[in-house]
């Protein structure tokens, strides 16, 4: 991240945008209600969250809103029973929402599939019954290795309906990454597709699953269910592999919804934290549904007529909270797209907004930067008047990109809501509402019930304008319930860096008006195109190659992806005997990482070096490499050696 340049731009940013009055008048939450809610939430957050919970259906209500006795293992809505799928689907079938469009999916070649709530409900029930007949039930782990297609949504909901715990693995991860997640989760079932379309080509996912399962041996899941999407021939290994279509065809479209404890796990999502190896972040039915429902309906002001398009892949948390669960909880109509945003040309998104009458478009800064490069003539070719609200997530958006999106896509009229949150938070934490004043590049103020702050290393708030660590000072319902099987890692990663506060791992600053400006990660996590990847993941993949003795990876600025990976590698002796040139070795090492981690994790630049800067105890000084790379002062190394070398880089340093 070009911290200094970005920071300079942000510090100079003075533009403010006021919401159009017709939006304020028609908003679900008007200025007065918002102010009153803030007051309730400040005075008594549990009352605020209890009211939010009462908007959903429960099989049994809670005895306690929040149990803090085992903090930081906070438990929300203790004693309550529910199922998020009951709220996302079942209850709608008894209302007018039953016949409304739930999901409109467009394949990359242009094929379209539509499901009403009732149709989606029936499909989910069929698949839930099929999973049950295979012996999958409460607490079992189901790995979903799928692209953006309706059956991915159906699989997630069907698993949750029967009380199984889904873990969606992004299709851009390698066989090895998939295997480690299957093993760590002890998955009983894997759901995948034959293939899917991306940038005019058919990508085969089933072969990657086959490869992942070769060495799983005793830990192999019993069953792999294969959805037909691309219609290509795939090898079906009997009796393990079953066809989705054969299974659901024979099932009834009614299924019992499992009664879950509010704190029973709903899903696992693997993400790279400071620990290096991806950990399974656990979310539960009760608190998560309350947080996601409230945050979506308030921030995106969901109306019965909305056509909500979240461009995220279901493999990331945004896909979970705001492509699948949130919109269905609020009874909205979802748009989902399979393919590449530039296929067949740079107006695919705008064309889809026009054809489907999209009202709300929630995207990432990387996507916007990519489309912005093609200029405003592409959005101009289309009638985008149905758009009401725009949103972004995942990485800082520079004021220039913000203003382009707002002006050329949002006609200068649609509020652009920059939402800050994380896989761990489950839900929006700091975000404006459509009624809010907006400052381009800022994520606005914390939502009611969320106590966020910017503090120094000891937990003291820093003055306005100063950089510091972003923390959350009170628990919130959408929060992770832990990391799968690792209580210590959960405490260390989030709760001990600054005792008593949730450490988000980001650096930020708060201005005089209390607006937050996120600058990027404070730890060794890269944010490449909005995807979190640990430097340790790259490094361990690199040193697994016999011609890389040592490796250190840092983030460098990238015009489209925000950040890219650069590796410093000490090559193994004798490499000259095998490779004709440095370039040849570099290409081999880059290919190796792509194969090891998957196409999502590519290394942009490699520098071969003789040694890496290290502390006396042998830890790599990545911040020295980073400072050299960005042409910044390295600082006083003697003190650095004594202190923790991995101490996060503070923005003012
Ligand atoms: C970053 C994605 C700036 C941040 C929902 C965070 C952001 C990480 C924003 C979480 C934003 C997320 N502005 N940075 N609006 N939203 N981030 O877990 O560094 O994939 O810690 O969740 O993305 O990434 P994750």
Image (spheres, rainbow, N blue to C red):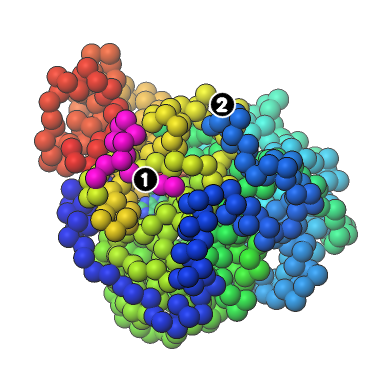
Image coordinates of residue 118 in percent, x first then y, are 77, 69
Q: Nearer the viewer, residue 532 or 182?
A: 532
Q: In the rendered image, which quarter contains the C terminus? A: top left
Whether ligand 1 has any atom under 8 Å from the Cβ at mark 1 is answered as no
Q: Main secondary structure of the magenta part?
A: loop
Image coordinates of residue 249 in percent, x first then y, are 84, 60
Q: Nearer the viewer, mark 2 or mark 1?
A: 1
Q: Is residue 475 left or right of residue 96?
A: left
Q: Is residue 253 left or right of residue 469?
A: right
- Residue at disc 2, secondary structure: helix
- Residue at disc 1, secondary structure: strand
| Residue under numbered circle 1 | 453
Label 2 crowd (10 A; few <14 / some 14-19 / many >=20):
few
Visible residue check, residue 143: no
- Establish if 194 lies above or below 383: above
Image coordinates of residue 612 in percent, x first then y, are 22, 24
Residue at figure coordinates x 54%, y 46% from the top left = 476
| Residue under numbered circle 2 | 487
- Magenta segment boundaries in residue numbering: 451-463
Q: Nearer the viewer, residue 581 or 635?
A: 635
- Establish if 427 lies above or below 33: above
Image coordinates of residue 335 in percent, x first then y, are 57, 70
């Amino acid at each position: 991240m070009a911290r200094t340049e970005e920071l300079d731009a942000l510090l100079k940013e003075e533009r403010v945008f006021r919401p159009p009055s017709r939006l304020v008048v028609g908003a679900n939450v008007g200025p007065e209600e918002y102010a009153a809610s803030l007051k309730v939430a400040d005075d008594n957050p549990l009352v605020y969250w209890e009211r939010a919970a009462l908007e959903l259906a429960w099989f049994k209500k809670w005895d306690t809103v929040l149990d803090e006795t085992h903090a930081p293992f906070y438990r929300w809505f203790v004693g309550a029973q529910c199922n998020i799928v009951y709220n996302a689907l079942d209850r709608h079938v008894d209302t007018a929402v039953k016949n409304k469009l739930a999901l409109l999916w467009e394949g990359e070649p242009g094929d379209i599939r539509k499901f009403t709530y009732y149709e989606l409900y029936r499909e989910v029930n069929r698949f839930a019954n099929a999973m049950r007949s295979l012996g999958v039930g409460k607490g079992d782990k189901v790995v979903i290795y799928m692209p953006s297609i309706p059956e991915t949504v159906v699989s997630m909901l069907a698993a949750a309906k029967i009380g199984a715990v889904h873990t969606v693995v992004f299709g851009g991860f390698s066989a090895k990454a998939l295997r480690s997640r299957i093993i760590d989760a002890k998955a009983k079932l894997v759901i995948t597709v034959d293939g899917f379309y991306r940038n005019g080509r058919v990508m085969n996912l089933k072969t990657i699953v086959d490869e992942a399962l070769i060495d799983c041996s005793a830990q192999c899941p019993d069953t792999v269910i294969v959805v037909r999407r691309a219609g290509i021939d795939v090898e079906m290994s009997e009796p393990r592999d079953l066809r989705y279509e054969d299974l659901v065809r024979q099932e009834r479209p009614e299924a019992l919804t499992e009664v879950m404890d509010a704190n029973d796990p709903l899903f696992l999502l693997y993400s790279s934290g400071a620990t290096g190896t991806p950990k399974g972040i656990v979310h539960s039915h009760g608190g998560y549904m309350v947080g996601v429902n409230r945050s979506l309906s308030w921030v995106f002001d969901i109306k019965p007529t909305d056509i909500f398009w979240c461009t995220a892949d279901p493999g990331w948390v945004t896909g979970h909270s705001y492509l699948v669960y949130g919109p269905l909880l609020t009874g909205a109509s979802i748009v989902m797209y399979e393919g590449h945003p530039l296929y067949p040309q740079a107006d695919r998104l705008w064309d889809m907004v026009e054809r489907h009458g999209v009202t709300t478009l929630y995207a990432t800064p990387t996507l916007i930067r990519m489309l912005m490069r093609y200029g405003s003539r592409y959005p101009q070719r289309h009638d985008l008047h149905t758009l009401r609200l725009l949103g972004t997530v995942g990485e800082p958006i520079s004021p220039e990109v913000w203003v382009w999106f707002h002006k050329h896509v949002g006609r200068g009229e649609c509020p652009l809501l920059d939402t800050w949150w994380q896989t761990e938070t489950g839900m929006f934490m700091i975000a404006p509402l459509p009624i809010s004043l907006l400052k381009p590049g800022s994520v606005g103020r914390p939502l009611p019930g969320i106590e966020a702050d910017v503090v120094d290393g000891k937990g003291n708030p820093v003055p306005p304008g100063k950089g510091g660590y972003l923390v959350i000072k009170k628990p919130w319902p959408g929060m992770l319930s832990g990391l799968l099987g690792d209580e210590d890692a959960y405490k260390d990663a989030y709760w001990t860096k600054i005792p008593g506060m949730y450490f988000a791992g980001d650096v930020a600053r708060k201005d005089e008006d209390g607006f937050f400006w996120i600058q990027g990660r404070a730890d060794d996590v890269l944010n490449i195109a909005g995807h979190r990847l640990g430097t340790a993941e790259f490094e361990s993949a690199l040193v697994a190659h016999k011609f890389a003795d040592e490796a250190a990876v840092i983030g460098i600025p990238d015009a489209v992806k925000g950040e890219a990976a650069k590796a410093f590698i000490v090559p193994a002796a004798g490499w000259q005997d095998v490779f004709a040139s440095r370039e040849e070795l570099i290409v081999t090492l880059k290919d190796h990482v792509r194969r090891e981690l998957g196409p999502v994790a590519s290394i942009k630049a490699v520098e071969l070096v003789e040694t890496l800067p290290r502390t006396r105890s042998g830890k790599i000084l990545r911040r020295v490499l980073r400072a050299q790379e960005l042409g910044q002062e390295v600082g006083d190394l003697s003190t650095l050696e004594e202190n923790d070398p991995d101490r996060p880089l503070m923005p003012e340093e």
